[in-house]
């Protein structure tokens, strides 16, 4: 394949990928008449902010946004920390059933979310009787299930980065008097930073976009998150497409900001994962 064909193919794929995002943002700025037109145009001569005002006018929208941000942030921090420690343990230590545990992580990724929802519902309900902060209708329950869902992938990915670090570095540090804690946080942790960036993006997107768990485990409106709150704009007689597009655009902004913050590490992180 010549370079020109490869470049053209890449540009076409990029345009196809970006087009839905462009259409969402464009529709958020269109007046109702243009959104519902039978002859939609890929531009607008009459941009408006009314859809954003409608989105912010929805009761509790700011609270939904804050709930999503809290859940996603906690999941990213905890999944990175736990996955890093688990990856080191599974790479540097030999113990019984290590291979079995790794296989179980893979199997967990193969099970559809919908199949896990009902068993997790009863599990969360029972956990709530012992620890109410992680029971039904709490943000703790969403943190718990999203953490469980994102951890297997994060551990598998970080394990490749830990394996790529020469053990001679740790031996040299040990000879210089470094203890296990120092080796863990001063040597291994900085070296797997690209992998942590890549896994943090996955964890953030998983928790931020979660709809199934939020709709299943949160039974009241006060603790609802943004994806489930979007249902407010769907009405029996006519959907508020302008409000849906505006709210979806607002939902996308934190993901883009997070991606920009970690993208420098993300590229090398994905490269390391491919090499593994």
Image (tube, grey):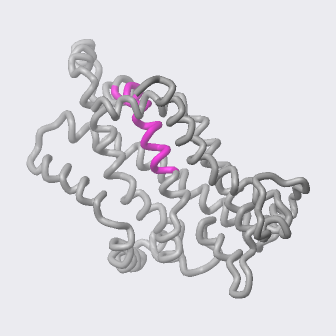
- Residue 250 pos. (x, y %): 71, 56
Q: Is residue 111 above or below residue 156?
A: below
Number of marks:
0
- Can you say which quadrant of the picture contains the C terminus? top left
Residue 263 sits inside the magenta stretch: no
Q: Relative to the observer, which residue lies in front, 104 or 234?
A: 234
Q: What secondary structure prevails in the magenta region? A: helix
- Residue 141 pos. (x, y %): 46, 68
The residue drawn where x is 63% and y is 49% is: 19
Residue 249: quadrant of the picture: bottom right
Q: Is residue 6 above or below residue 59?
A: above
The residue drawn where x is 29% and y is 65% is: 111
The residue drawn where x is 36% and y is 52% is: 151
Q: Relative to the observer, which residue lies in front, 180 or 56?
A: 56
In the picture provided, is 202 more to the left or to the right than 28?
A: left
- Can you say which quadrant of the picture contains the N terminus? top left
Residue 194 sits inside the magenta stretch: yes
- Residue 263 pos. (x, y %): 54, 33
Range of magenta residues: 188-204
Q: Is residue 265 above or below residue 53?
A: above
Q: Residue furthest right?
A: 46
- Residue 53 pos. (x, y %): 85, 64
Q: Residue furthest bottom?
A: 236
In the picture provided, is 55 more to the left or to the right than 93?
A: right
């Amino acid at each position: 394949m010549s370079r020109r064909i490869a470049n053209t193919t890449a540009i076409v794929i990029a345009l196809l990928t970006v087009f839905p995002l462009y259409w969402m943002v464009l529709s958020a700025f269109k007046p109702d008449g243009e959104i519902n037109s039978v002859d939609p145009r890929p531009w607008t001569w009459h941009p408006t902010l009314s859809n954003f005002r409608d989105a912010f006018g929805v009761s509790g929208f700011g609270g939904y946004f804050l709930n999503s941000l809290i859940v996603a942030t906690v999941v990213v921090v905890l999944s990175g920390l736990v996955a890093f420690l688990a990856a080191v343990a599974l790479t540097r230590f030999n113990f019984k059933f290590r291979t079995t545990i790794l296989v179980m992580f893979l199997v967990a990724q193969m099970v559809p979310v919908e199949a896990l929802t009902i068993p997790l519902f009863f599990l969360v309900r029972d956990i709530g009787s012992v620890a109410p902060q992680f029971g039904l209708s709490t943000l703790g329950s969403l943190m718990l299930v999203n953490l469980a869902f994102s951890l297997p992938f994060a551990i598998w990915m970080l394990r490749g980065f830990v394996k790529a670090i020469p053990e001679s570095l740790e031996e040299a540090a040990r000879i210089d008097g470094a203890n296990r804690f120092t080796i863990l946080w001063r040597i291994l942790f900085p070296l797997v930073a690209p992998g942590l960036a890549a896994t943090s993006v996955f964890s953030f997107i998983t928790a931020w976009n979660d709809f199934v768990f939020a709709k299943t485990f949160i039974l009241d409106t006060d603790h609802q998150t943004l994806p489930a709150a979007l249902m407010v704009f769907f009405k029996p007689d006519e959907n508020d497409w302008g409000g849906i597009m505006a709210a979806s655009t607002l939902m996308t902004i934190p993901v883009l900001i997070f991606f920009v913050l970690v993208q420098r590490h993300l590229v090398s992180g994905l490269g390391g994962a491919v090499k593994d």
